[in-house]
Each structure stands twice: as structure tokens, then as C-alpha cells.
Amino acid sequence: MIVSKKFSITVPDEVFTLMEEWAEKQGRPTANLAAYLVEAGLRAAMDKQEFVPKKKSKDGSHQ
């Protein structure tokens, strides 16, 4: 089972305004866009091997 985790970040006003505009254009909440961007950034770092996870657990998540 996949479990979602929550955390908060602080971004400059300009970044938040741009994200609000982008999210509105896509018809989604700003938080959903932020989650997508974090996941996309992590996947990109893993693809470039800038970050290599330690190992996968039995449920397929990284530890």
C-alpha cells in the first residue's frame, strides 16, 4: 500500500505567485502542483544519478 506523507516548505512570494498562476492554468490546486514538481525533481535527480536511493523495502518504497 502506498502511503502519502505531508510536509511544508517556504518559498519566496514571487515563486508562490508563479506557482499559483501555473496551477490555475492547469486547473489544479497549488499544493498538487508543488507535489508534482517535487516528485519530478526527485525522479530527474535519480535519472541523472545525482541521487541514488539506499535500497528498496518490501513494499517497494525507498529507505
Image (tube, rainbow, N blue to C red):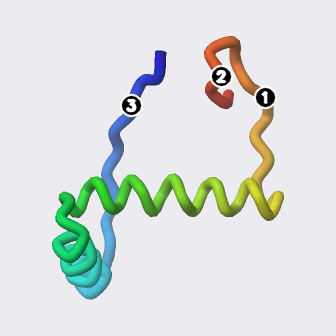
Marks 3 & 1, CB-CB < 8 Å contact: no
Determine crowd level at label 3: few under 14, some 14-19, many 20+ residues with C-alpha closer than 10 A. Answer: few
Tell which residue pokes out farthest to the bottom in this image.
14
Side of 47 relative to 31 (left or right)? right
What kind of element bears circle 3? Answer: loop
What kind of element bears circle 2? Answer: loop
Marks 3 & 2, CB-CB < 8 Å contact: no
Which mark identifies residue 41?
none
The correct choice, above or below, for 2 with respect to 20 in the image is: above
Marks 3 and 2, Cα distance to the nearest angstrom?
A: 14 Å
Q: What residue is drawn where x is 31% and y is 51%?
A: 8
Side of 48 relative to 24 (left or right)? right
Q: What residue is drawn where x is 80% and y is 64%?
A: 48
Determine crowd level at label 2: few under 14, some 14-19, many 20+ residues with C-alpha closer than 10 A. Answer: few
**Residue type of the residue flagged with mark 3:** Ser
Name the residue that disc number 2 marks: 60
Which quarter of the picture shows residue 43?
bottom right
Where is residue 38 shown, x and y percent of the image? 48, 58
**Residue type of the residue flagged with mark 1:** Lys
Question: Which of pointers 3 and 2 lies earlier in the amino acid sequence?
Answer: 3
Which mark identifies residue 55?
1
Tell which residue pokes out farthest to the front in this image.
26
* Quarter occupied by the C terminus: top right
Which quarter of the picture shows residue 59?
top right
Judge by depth and name the residue closer to the eye, 36 or 8: 36
Judge by depth and name the residue closer to the eye, 2 or 7: 2
Name the residue that disc number 3 marks: 4
